[in-house]
Image (cartoon, rainbow, N blue to C red):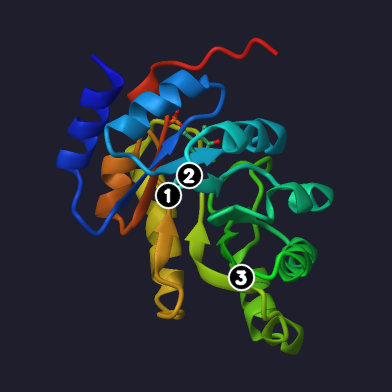
C-alpha cells in the first residue's frame, strides 16, 4: 500500500468533523512530501530539532502540530511557526509558550494534555490540575495562547474496555468546557474507538507510513 492510498483509506473511513494528523516523526522529508501531494496539510512531530529541520525545508502551508513532551527551554525554537501544541502538561510550560508567542507577535493554539491512563509514566495533568489552571486569574492574563481543547493517550493495553473508559472520562470532563472543543486522542491502534468515544482529532503514524525504525 502507498502512503497516498493509506491516507485516502483513513480519510474516507472517518467522519468529516474529525481531523487527521499525520504523524511524520522519524520519517524523511520525501515521505512527508508524498503525503503532502496527496492533499494532507496537518502533520505531527514529537522532537523539536526534527520538527525545526523539517519545517525549514518543507512547504510553508503545512500545519505543524507538536505532539510530544515539550521542554520549556525549547519552546522558542517552534514558537515562530507552530500551529498547535498538543502536549501542554504544566502551567509553567503554558506561561513560557505565552511569552514566546508574544515575542513572535502571535497567538499560539494549545491543548492541555490530560493524564487518563493507568500507567504512572504517561505525562499529563489530572482533572483537578486542569480546573485549577483554567480557573486561575493568572491564566486569564495570558493573551498570547489560545486553549483549543484537550489531548490524551490511553493506557498501553489491548483491553478495549479500559481504553474506551479512559477516553470517555476525558470526553465527559471536557463537556464542562464548551469553548475548548478539540479532543485529540486516538492513534493507529485505537483511532476508530477513539472516534466512537468523542475524539475530534486523531494522530496516526504507522498505519500510514509503516512501522518506525529508531536508528538514532
Ligand atoms: C508517535 C505518536 C503517535 C502516532 O502513533 P502511531 O501508533 O504510529 O499511529 C500519536 N501520538 C503521539 C503523541 C505519538 O508520539
Q: Mark 1 points at which residue?
A: 185
Please tell me whether mark 3 or mark 2 is closer to you in this view. Answer: 3
Please state the horizontal and vertical placement of residue 101, each as a whole percent of the image: 70, 66
Residue at 41% from the left image edge and 60% from the top image edge:
183
Q: Is mark 1 on a helix, strand or loop?
A: loop
Label 1 Cα neighbours within 10 Å, binned few <14 / some 14-19 / many ≥20 = many
Q: In this view, does 86 lie to the left or right of 77?
A: left
Residue at 59% from the left image edge and 53% from the top image edge:
82
Residue closest to the eye, 161 or 40 = 40
Q: Quadrant of the N terminus?
A: top left
The tag earlier along the polypeptide, 1 or 3, is 3
Q: In this view, does 65 lie above or below 102?
A: above
Q: Name the residue under label 2.
A: 154
Please state the horizontal and vertical placement of residue 119, each as a whole percent of the image: 61, 41
**Circles 1 and 2: CB distance less than 8 Å?**
yes
Q: In this view, does 122 lie to the left or right of 16?
A: right
**Circles 1 and 3: CB distance less than 8 Å?**
no
Q: Label 1 vs label 3: CA separation? A: 23 Å
Q: Label 1 vs label 2: CA separation? A: 8 Å
Residue at 30% from the left image edge and 22% from the top image edge:
3
Please tell me whether mark 1 or mark 3 is closer to you in this view. Answer: 3
For this orientation, the residue located farthest to the right is: 73
Q: Number of marks in the image?
A: 3
Please state the horizontal and vertical placement of residue 121, each as a whole percent of the image: 68, 40
**Res. 203 image quadrant:** top left
Q: Name the residue under label 3.
A: 107
The tag earlier along the polypeptide, 3 or 2, is 3
Q: Is mark 2 on a helix, strand or loop?
A: loop
Q: Is residue 186 left or right of residue 65?
A: left
Residue closest to the eye, 66 or 193 = 66
Amino acid at each position: 500500500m502507498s502512503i497516498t492510498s493509506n491516507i485516502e483509506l483513513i480519510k474516507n473511513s472517518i467522519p468529516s468533523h474529525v481531523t487527521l494528523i499525520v504523524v511524520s516523526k522519524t520519517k524523511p522529508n520525501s515521505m512527508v512530501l508524498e503525503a503532502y501531494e496527496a492533499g494532507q496539510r496537518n502533520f505531527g512531530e514529537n522532537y523539536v530539532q526534527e520538527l525545526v529541520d523539517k519545517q525549514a525545508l518543507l512547504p510553508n502551508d503545512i500545519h505543524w502540530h507538536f505532539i510530544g513532551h515539550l521542554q520549556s527551554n525549547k519552546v522558542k525554537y517552534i514558537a515562530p511557526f507552530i500551529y498547535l501544541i498538543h502536549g501542554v502538561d504544566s502551567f509553567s510550560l503554558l506561561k513560557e509558550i505565552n511569552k514566546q508567542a508574544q515575542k513572535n507577535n502571535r497567538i499560539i493554539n494549545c491543548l492541555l494534555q490530560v493524564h487518563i491512563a493507568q500507567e504512572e509514566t504517561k505525562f499529563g495533568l489530572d482533572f483537578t490540575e486542569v480546573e485549577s489552571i483554567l480557573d486561575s486569574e493568572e491564566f486569564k492574563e495570558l493573551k498570547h495562547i489560545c486553549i483549543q481543547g484537550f489531548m490524551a493517550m490511553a493506557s498501553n493495553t489491548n483491553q478495549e474496555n479500559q481504553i474506551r473508559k479512559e477516553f470517555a472520562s476525558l470526553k465527559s470532563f471536557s463537556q464542562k468546557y464548551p469553548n475548548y472543543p478539540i479532543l485529540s486522542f486516538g492513534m493507529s491502534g485505537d483511532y476508530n474507538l477513539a472516534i466512537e468515544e468523542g475524539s475530534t482529532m486523531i494522530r496516526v503514524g504507522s498505519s500510514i507510513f509503516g512501522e518506525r525504525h529508531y536508528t538514532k
